[in-house]
Image (spheres, rainbow, N blue to C red):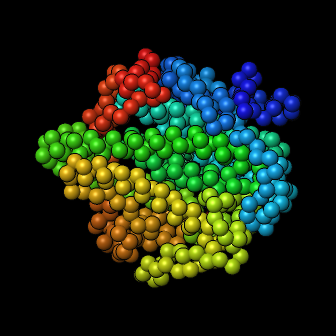
Amino acid sequence: MAVDYQERIPNNVRLHEDRRLLRALEEWQPRFLQWWSDMGPEGFQARDVYLRTATSVDAQGWAHFDYVRMPEYRWGIFLAEPEPGRAIGFGAHRGQAAWQEVPGEYRGTLRRLIVTQGDTEPASVEQQRQLGRTCPSLYDLRNIFQVNVEEGRHLWAMVYLLHAHFGRDGREEAEALLQRHAGDRDKPRILGAFNERTPDWLSFFMFTYFTDRDGKYQLASLAESGFDPLSRTCRFMLTEEAHHMFVGEAGLGRVVQRTCEVMREHRTDDVREHGAIDLPTIQRYLNFHFSVSIDLFGGEISTNAANFYTAGLKGRFEEGKKTDDHVLAEATYPVTQLDGERVVTREEAALTALNERLRDDYIADCQRGIDRWNQTIRKQGIDFELRLPHRGFHRAIGAFAGTRVSPDGRVVSQAEWDARHGTWLPTESDKAFVQSLMVPVVERGKFASWIAPPARGINGHAVDFEYVRS
Ligand code: BYC
């Protein structure tokens, strides 16, 4: 299904047939562009960046690569192709035809889900806006900008749903998405992780590995939605999301690789003086980003999640591949929780445990990258293992919030926490050290001291290709 690029707002939803909607979105567009110029990547806006733009939404060849200046990027509205005869796959409406319009009874709930999702997209662009200035290479600079423009497009995706299906409140919510800002005292973003700072590239790679992966799982659950326009838009967003997680996984892999090379070359664990990031510091960053990202799944026991499911609005990850009744009225699911000072696992009603189940799918997926990085470490003959911390560690949402849990899953006293948290979470001196490495490298084919070059370039180009023109 081709995207019409002749339109002011490129789209594959026949926008020209709905004048009112078109006008509303054309009014929103300059405000989006203003937001991009105020809150988007700092510097580089006049540069030619080698970017990928979606030109069609079918599985083959939807990506077109060329030099573009970011403010001229063709942000637009692209939904995956409709599946003829699609039926709702779960909950109380299972088997009924998927909704093309918002069912009145679920209007508020659906709007809130779309707003929560939509809020994260511009938030991440805001969090990352300074990073271009300290890029470790032109290759990485191009990658962060690709991520940023696509997050901008994901905002468009949610704003389209709000404008097309929620009338006046939808338009108001679309405005508010440009008014809240990451870390703003008065108007913060909705979810915790999107108010944290992304001050350096190690944090950026952690963010794209861990937090974008939450995006994958949330979008995949929303792609199951009985509200068909939401399902179709999330399905297309997922194709873009894959690149963001690649940036994180490959980026961290290259950091680990470089650290190990320096350890071997200089026969030392103390790689800082050679401009690399020591493995314990990488572990502490990992502990932080994993813990704030698993908070994004909500409470372990959530009646919100049960209601979203029963209403047919938000499914499970790969709902269609599951072989149970897709209603879950009787089923149970094991949930890790606190029993006084002990961490225990108990069977809970599967319906209210849906956040936890999605978190489990996510954690298993996170582990795969850790295994690969550990392979790199082992291959270099180094005796060190990166680990995901326990799910109770450093949590602000859910059953573990307010309890001190060590990375290996023990409930610890405040005194032990105070004594040891500097070995578990990035310290001020870790952050200052990482910050000290953030010097821009913009010469073609050159890389900062703390990161190895990638195995290959983008779209068949060499690693030393001019990904961002000067
Ligand atoms: N921070 O019933 P509970 C992405 C609130 S990332 C602050 O446990 P529920 C991306 C919650 O709202 C994916 N507040 O939660 C990645 C509720 O409030 P009320 C984003 C939180 O509702 C990188 C109360 O606590 N997508 O795409 O079951 C770059 C009780 O909560 C938090 C979505 O989030 C938190 N972390 O589940 C770019 C999908 N957690 O009702 C993009 C849409 C919970 O008491 N959202 N609360 O006022 C949802 O599915 C659900 O809203 C959540 C929360 C999974 C987030």
69 w.r.t. 373: above or below: above
> Hey, which residue is sitting farthest left in the picture?
267
Q: Residue drawn 45% across and 26% down? A: 460
The x, y position of residue 132, in whole percent, is 44, 30
Q: Residue drawn 42% across and 81% down? A: 342
**Closest to the observer: 232 or 279?**
232
- Occupied quadrant, residue 300: bottom right
314 w.r.t. 344: above or below: above
Task: Name the quadrant of the C terminus.
Answer: top left
**Closest to the observer: 453 or 344?**
453
> Hey, which residue is sitting farthest top in the picture?
470
Does residue 267 appear in this view?
yes
Q: Is residue 277 left or right of residue 143?
A: left
The x, y position of residue 383, in whole percent, is 21, 57
Q: Residue drawn 50% across and 41% down? A: 244
- Occupied quadrant, residue 291: bottom left
Q: Is residue 262 left or right of residue 140?
A: left
Q: How many marks?
A: 0
Taking the image as four quarters, which one is ligand 1 found in? bottom right
Does residue 134 appear in this view?
no
Task: Name the quadrant of the N terminus.
Answer: top right
The x, y position of residue 467, in whole percent, is 44, 23
440 w.r.t. 355: above or below: above
Q: Residue drawn 56% across and 67% down? A: 356
The x, y position of residue 395, in whole percent, is 47, 64
